């Protein structure tokens, strides 16, 4: 086996170590509708277009504009969904063996939470609004709604929600709701009948739970991602790896790590897949190819579940960047520990690293991706000439770790080619108005004996007025943003889809797509009843002056039924055979 000795300059090592801690992958954007925007550490104060499968971490802000929706999925099957005109900020995500803390700030908008409690010593989901902090410690489902003046409504479907204000605490049990106004006046009443937002969320929950076939083949810690795998692929048995997963509806020239981009996130290049299922197969496990099956994903063993920015090997030059998916057992070089068969470049002498120049998948037709360096950085297609189609079998030196290429502005954006109209951005005066509530200064209440607002335990309970009937809905009066898009050099406003590396040489992938579309309400004009005229005799009018009613306007409007996620639900029987997996 041919090996190459790689020597890394000292300044590169210092550049790597000086960066921030590696992103952990504890949260991602799992569903997105409309022009959702995100603001991260790397984008600084700039709002940029978000994308499905974007990892989300501490300090990130997200804005959901008119007619938009967002779903965040956390490790362990916890989901948060945001309705239109909602602003959220991730204050803290810590999901590990010591604590499991999710703390979200919501200055305005509406969030539905489906929390799967971990029942560990320090475990909490906390949502902070301008005047309220809501905490749950066990399995719970609730809806929290904030209007312009900070008044907050919390409706509880399952579990118990602990509520704290500046003056004290209370708790709300399933089937009830609480309304808290500025000044801490509070009312608890039976929960209202479900509205459209709540009904959609409950249906979405049921949909995600109905797709559980993949749990037979996944480590328990990854069972929360069953829905993606069940919906977009199938499991097959292989003698070498046991049961493996292969995607459906892909073209013959498709390969892993191609339909998406590498974005610079917290001092590393992280793969963001534009495929709806493209989270777990690109950040856990490995890929392999077999005739008769095609490409398939090999899930990690129970003791080898480690998230990574993307399990690939790299080659890069001043002209192009190239990568190939790693097969089971091949070494991944990264700046952090990413499980067995990985090397942490922060803790080794890189002068002693011997990198093999032979990768199993590099021999598979069309497995290697080669793009222009500028395309890698900006996402804009640039034609490359006079470069090897497969550098991994051409004797080019393999690079340990990520490409040492300085990112540009576009490199830090999940979806750099999507242009969003200025009016889709958050309203500045709304954001500034909520800053006085000091949401960011609140600490997480890791158990219900800790106060959010004070250093000691809350002194008393809120004075709550109890109602025997559902309280009427609050009137929300928040200025809406304009979700129109502006496309350069075009008169018509159309949706722009970013170019992918795969589009350089092949047609787009035929993946399932979210087919739901927003259908505006059409007004139906029905003639008002005529007044009674008694026995008044009217002269007959000539036929030519009689205007017949347009019957088309009286036809009922038929709208397509929308699945919880807007896609067709495909269920296929799977074998109950025993799971067999190689450990890597």
Image (spheres, helix red, strand yellow):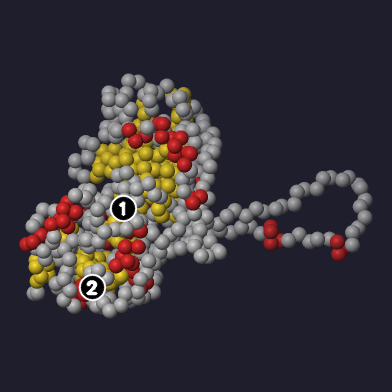
For this rendering, which residue is in front, 396 or 173? 396
Q: Which residue is mark 1?
A: 55
Q: Residue at 32% x, 32% y: name it.
A: 442
Q: Residue at 27% x, 32% y: name it.
A: 447
536 relative to 463 in the view: left or right: right
Instruction: Look at the image and tell me whether residue 388 can be seen.
Output: yes
Q: Nearer the viewer, mark 2 or mark 1?
A: 1
Name the secondary structure under disc 1. Answer: loop
The quarter of the rendered structure image containing the C terminus is bottom left
Instruction: Look at the image and tell me whether residue 140 can be seen.
Output: no
Q: Which mark is residue 289?
A: 2
Mark 1 burial class by Cα count in 10 Å: few <14, some 14-19, many 20+: many
For this rendering, which residue is in front, 395 or 574? 395
161 relative to 477 in the view: left or right: left
Q: Residue at 40% x, 64% y: name it.
A: 498
The percent position of residue 98, horizontal first and vertical second, equals 19, 41
Q: Quadrant of residue 32?
A: bottom left
Against 22, residue 163 (above or below) is above
The percent position of residue 203, horizontal first and vertical second, equals 43, 50
The percent position of residue 328, horizontal first and vertical second, equals 17, 66
For this rendering, which residue is in front, 339 or 413? 413
């Amino acid at each position: 086996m041919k090996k190459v000795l790689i020597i890394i300059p000292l300044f590169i090592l210092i550049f790597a170590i000086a960066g921030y801690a590696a992103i952990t992958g504890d949260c991602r954007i799992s569903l997105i509708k409309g022009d959702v925007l995100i603001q991260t550490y790397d984008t600084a104060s700039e709002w940029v277009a978000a994308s499905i499968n974007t990892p989300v971490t501490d300090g990130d802000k997200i804005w959901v504009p008119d007619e938009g929706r967002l779903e965040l999925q956390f490790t362990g099957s916890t989901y948060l969904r945001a309705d239109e005109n909602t602003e959220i900020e991730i204050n803290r995500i810590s999901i590990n063996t010591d604590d499991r803390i999710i703390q979200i700030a919501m200055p305005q908008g509406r969030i539905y939470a489906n929390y799967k409690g971990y029942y560990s010593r320090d475990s909490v989901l906390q949502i902070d609004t301008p005047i309220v902090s809501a905490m749950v410690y066990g399995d719970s489902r609730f809806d929290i709604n904030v209007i312009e003046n900070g008044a907050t409504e919390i409706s509880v479907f399952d579990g118990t929600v602990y509520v704290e204000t500046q003056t004290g605490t209370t708790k709300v049990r399933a089937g009830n709701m609480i309304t808290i106004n500025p000044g801490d006046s509070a009312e608890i009443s039976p929960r209202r009948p479900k509205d459209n937002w709540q009904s959609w969320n409950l249906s979405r929950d049921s949909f995600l739970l109905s797709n559980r076939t993949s749990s037979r083949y996944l480590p328990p810690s990854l069972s929360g991602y069953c829905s993606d795998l069940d919906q977009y692929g199938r499991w097959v048995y292989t003698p070498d790896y046991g049961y493996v997963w292969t995607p459906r509806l892909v073209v013959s020239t498709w390969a892993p790590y191609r339909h998406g981009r590498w974005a610079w996130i917290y001092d590393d290049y992280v793969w963001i897949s534009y495929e709806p299922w493209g989270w777990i197969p690109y950040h856990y496990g490995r890929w392999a190819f077999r005739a008769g099956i095609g490409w398939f994903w090999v899930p990690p063993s129970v003791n080898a579940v480690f998230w990574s920015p993307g399990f690939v090997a790299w080659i890069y030059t001043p002209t192009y960047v190239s990568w190939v998916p790693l097969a089971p057992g091949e070494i991944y070089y990264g700046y952090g520990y990413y499980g067995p068969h990985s090397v942490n470049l922060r803790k080794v002498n890189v002068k002693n690293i011997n990198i093999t120049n032979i990768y199993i998948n590099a021999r598979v037709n069309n497995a290697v991706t080669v793009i222009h360096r500028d395309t890698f950085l900006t996402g804009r297609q640039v034609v490359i000439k006079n470069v090897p189609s497969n550098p991994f079998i051409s004797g080019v030196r393999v690079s340990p770790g990520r490409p040492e290429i300085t990112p540009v502005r576009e490199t830090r954006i999940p979806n750099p080619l999507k242009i969003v109209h200025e009016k889709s951005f958050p309203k500045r005066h709304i954001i500034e108005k909520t800053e006085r509530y000091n949401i960011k200064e609140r600490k997480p209440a890791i158990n219900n004996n800790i106060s959010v607002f004070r250093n000691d335990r809350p002194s008393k309970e809120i004075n709550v007025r109890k109602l025997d009937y559902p309280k009427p809905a609050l009137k929300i009066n928040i200025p809406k943003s304009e979700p129109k898009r502006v496309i350069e050099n075009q008169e018509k406003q159309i949706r722009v889809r970013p170019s992918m590396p795969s589009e350089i040489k092949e047609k787009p992938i035929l993946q399932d797509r979210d087919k739901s579309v927003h259908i505006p309400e059409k007004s139906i004009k029905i003639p008002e009843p005529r007044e009674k005229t008694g026995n008044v005799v009217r002269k007959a009018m000539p036929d030519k002056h009689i205007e017949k009613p347009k019957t088309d306007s009286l036809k009922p409007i038929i709208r397509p039924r929308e699945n919880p996620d807007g896609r067709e639900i495909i269920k296929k029987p799977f074998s109950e055979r025993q799971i067999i997996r190689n450990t890597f």
